């Protein structure tokens, strides 16, 4: 707020405090000072200066001291009669207790990360089922928890972007750039997940999740890179380099016998039973040469 609007808001709050204090026969001067100058006093001073009626140690003490006093609301007034009245405790319902458990910024953040990774794993490995179930439930609970917290859209966007970068790191050769970008986006997303000045995710949780996530996807990317560099074990390319036996005389055409019988050509004549090595695959015909070469 600019200075003029701030003065108006302060004056309005101070006037409201004075009005309430006067209606309750309280110290109106202290109420205004509490608004304008943020003054504070101890419980003993509050009783002495007519800010409160009395100080009670527990609920029974409160009821005992309140009994017989008068209440005032505008022009209406009457005695307070609470002596001997049974105390009925109203416990919160399951939904409120669940929100109370989940509406913790750290738990909401962990649930959302678990949900994102569960769905990513299910999409990468269709049919796994369990990661999809756990991820879906976690994501719904995270959204339920975030509905009770002051969420910032930029934080959510950064978390999703970080997850996309990490998945791309396992599919694209980026020399670690996508992985580093994903880790940075996750860290910034956790920092900016909630509105400034409200709540925040604890640093140990942020750093721990970022470290575990980065290590996991780095290991996954390394495994994918090693798999790409391994020799092909299926298809026509997998036949190149295999040793086989000539079934017919190759001069230059004939056949060789492995798990199947193929047409084969060789620049060097070969006799039946001679060991040959596959050097090329052309359609259904193989180019071979004697293993001794």
Image: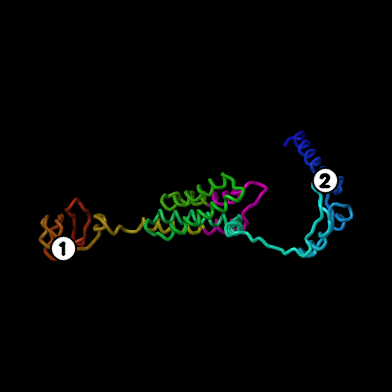
Residue 225, relative to residue 245: is it above or below? Answer: above
* Relative vertical location of residue 244 with respect to residue 169 in this rendering, above or below: below
Q: Position of residue 33 (x, y in %)?
A: 84, 45
Farthest residue to the right: give it: 48
Residue sitting at x 55%, y 52%: 144
Q: Are the residues at dot 1 and dot 2 in contact (C-beta closer than 8 Å)?
A: no
Foreground residue, 38 or 91?
A: 91
Q: Secondary structure at mark 2?
A: helix
| Residue at image location 48% in from the left, 59% down from the top | 216
Where does the magenta region start and end? 183-212
Position of residue 216 in the picture relative to residue 247 (left or right)? right
Main secondary structure found in the magenta portion: helix
Residue under label 1 = 257
Residue 41 locus on image (x, y percent): 84, 54
Residue 155 visible from this viewpoint: yes
Determine if residue 42 is in view: no
The magenta stretch spans residue 73: no
Counting residues from the N terminus, which is met first, the one under dot 1 or under dot 2? 2
On screen, residue 136 versus residue 91, left or right, reads left
Q: Which residue is mark 2?
A: 23
Spot occupied by residue 97 in the image (x, y as percentages of width and height): 60, 59
251 vs 143, left or right, is left
* Residue at (72, 64) in percent of width and height: 86
The reply to whether the magenta stretch includes residue 198 is yes
């Amino acid at each position: 707020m600019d200075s003029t609007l701030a003065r108006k808001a302060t004056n309005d709050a101070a006037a409201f405090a004075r009005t309430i204090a006067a209606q309750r026969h309280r110290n109106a001067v202290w109420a205004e000072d509490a608004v304008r100058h943020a003054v504070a006093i101890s419980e003993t001073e509050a009783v002495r200066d007519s800010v409160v009626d009395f100080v009670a140690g527990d609920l029974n003490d409160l009821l005992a001291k309140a009994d017989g006093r008068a209440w005032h609301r505008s022009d209406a007034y009457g005695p307070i009669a609470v002596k001997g009245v049974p105390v009925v405790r109203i416990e919160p319902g399951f939904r409120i207790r669940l929100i109370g458990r989940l509406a913790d910024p750290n738990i909401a953040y962990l649930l959302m990360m678990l949900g994102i990774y569960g769905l990513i794993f299910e999409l990468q490995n269709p049919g796994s089922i369990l990661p999809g179930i756990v991820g879906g439930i976690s994501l719904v609970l995270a959204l339920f928890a975030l509905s009770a917290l002051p969420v910032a859209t930029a934080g959510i966007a950064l978390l999703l972007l970080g997850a996309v970068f990490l998945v791309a790191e396992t599919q694209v050769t980026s020399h670690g750039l996508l992985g580093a970008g994903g880790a940075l986006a996750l860290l910034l997303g956790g920092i900016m997940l909630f509105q400034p000045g409200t709540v925040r995710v604890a640093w140990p949780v942020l750093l721990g999740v970022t470290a575990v996530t980065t290590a996991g996807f780095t290991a996954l990317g390394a495994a994918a890179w090693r798999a790409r560099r391994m020799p092909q074990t299926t298809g026509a390319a997998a036949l190149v380099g295999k040793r086989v036996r000539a079934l017919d005389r190759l001069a230059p055409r004939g056949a060789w016998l492995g798990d199947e019988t193929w047409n084969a050509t060789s620049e060097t004549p070969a006799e039946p039973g001679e060991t040959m090595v596959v050097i090329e695959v052309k359609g259904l015909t193989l180019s071979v040469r004697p293993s001794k070469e």
